[in-house]
Amino acid sequence: MIRIAVAPEPIDLAAELAAIEAGGAGGIASFTGLVRADDGVTELELEHYPGMTEAALTELAESATQRWSLLGATIIHRVGRMRPGERIVFVATAALHRREALDACAFLIDRLKTGAPFWKRERRGEDAAWVEAKVSDDAAAGRWGA
Amino acid sequence: MIRIAVAPEPIDLAAELAAIEAGGAGGIASFTGLVRADDGVTELELEHYPGMTEAALTELAESATQRWSLLGATIIHRVGRMRPGERIVFVATAALHRREALDACAFLIDRLKTGAPFWKRERRGEDAAWVEAKVSDDAAAGRWGA
Amino acid sequence: MDVLYFAWVRERVGAGHEHVDPPAGITTVADLIGWLAGRSSGHAAAFAEPERLRAAIDQKFVPLDAPLGRAREVALFPPVTGG
Amino acid sequence: MDVLYFAWVRERVGAGHEHVDPPAGITTVADLIGWLAGRSSGHAAAFAEPERLRAAIDQKFVPLDAPLGRAREVALFPPVTGG
């Protein structure tokens, strides 16, 4: 019921949603993060810490299933190079009732932003720059308490 | 950027997500409601008020786009007969930043539960019963203020 | 005036819609419900407990004490249960 | 002890990992950072501003004042920016 994947392949949303829907839930909440096409980025590169990444995401999904009654939790994070409009991350949660699915989904994406070892580098034509962490991400992760 | 559909056909999640992703967003939040398979229901029937339904859903989506900076809002509601595990409703919101997409998605599904003219009838073998409205749905819709 | 019924209201009345011409004293949705209840035993069963009903005038939700005004279409139904 | 570097820390050091054997006085992550800074000009550039760094010991996030203990793998990197 927990599914974690970290891979360079494009994220297959239809397959991931079908898998989590098969668990008998009443509601599925999901969040998909995309490479934004609006700010001149021509390519995004995602670096991660192999081994620790999967462990951190598994721990994050487990903490969600302890906090809410979930029938499923999926976290898929793409790594490597991707282009504007492509999917970077997908999280989904399944529960009998919508509130649990919605809250757990928001929790997972907020916590993932600050609690898993990924680093983004943006390319704009010839220039490449590491993305700076946002203070607002720490605040969002903190909404959920310890 | 607002897409509303009320139809007896199964909801094509992959197509709906691809459509809303095409708007250049940074994040897409979605919620899918399924016919629960756990409580003996053999068939669910959804009745609605043609004309008013589409108007109510359009108004709901517009109120979300006024409240949050959304690049897209989709509400698809199935009507007619469906079986356990099938999708009843799908809402999705697209925004530059995840918080807006997540909040607007929760708003849409909470408000849809009490603000659009749909009625569910559950069949369990030979028995059929209209579903009673939940007080908790009024409370959830009320979270978002007037 | 067209009156529409949905869900168990429709089932008890035995029809999804009807055209009615209420008398002059019927000025609110609640008045209309009371008047409709006298049309048949099915109507009486549908409208026995007005507190279980909700209404729309010309496809907008309204409370039961709303004036009918120049309503062309009034719908009566149980609380909604979509989503 | 294996030391791993990510993102701009890796780029400035010029390597993704190295095996080091710090002296006995190096007991915390912050001590390790200060000691690593002396290994090359690349290390010096990577570790010039420790407040911009984050760390993990044996694949768990730790604060910079965490004791190294029996760490087998220490990772040094900028604040994470995934999702």
Image: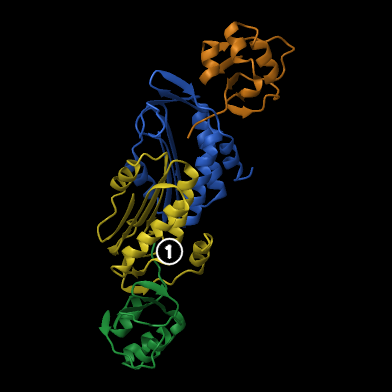
Chain colours: A blue, B yellow, C green, D orange
Q: Measured along the vertical axis of the image, is residue A93 above or below residue C78?
A: above
Q: Measured along the vertical axis of the image, is residue C15 above or below residue A100?
A: below
Mark 1 Cα shell of 10 Å, populated few (<14), some (14-19), many (≥20): many
Residue furthest top in the image: D40
Closer-to-camera residue (B105/A22): B105
Residue furthest right in the image: D25
Residue drawn at x 47%, y 56% as measured from the top left: B107
| Image spot of residue A76 (x, y percent) | 42, 36
| Quarter of the image where one finds residue D45 | top right
Q: Chain of mark 1?
A: B
Q: Measured along the vertical axis of the image, is residue A34 above or below residue D71?
A: below
Q: Measured along the vertical axis of the image, is residue A139 above or below residue B145?
A: above
Quarter in which the N terminus of chain A is drawn: top left
| Quarter of the image where one finds residue B7 | bottom left
| Image spot of residue B37 (x, y percent) | 38, 59
Residue drawn at x 58%, y 40% as measured from the top left: A141
Q: Which residue is identified by label 1? A: B113
| Quarter of the image where one finds residue D79 | top right
Task: Please indicate whether residue C69 sits to the left or right of residue D52 in the image.
Answer: left
Residue drawn at x 52%, y 30% as measured from the top left: D81
Residue A92 appearing in the image: yes
Residue A70 appearing in the image: no
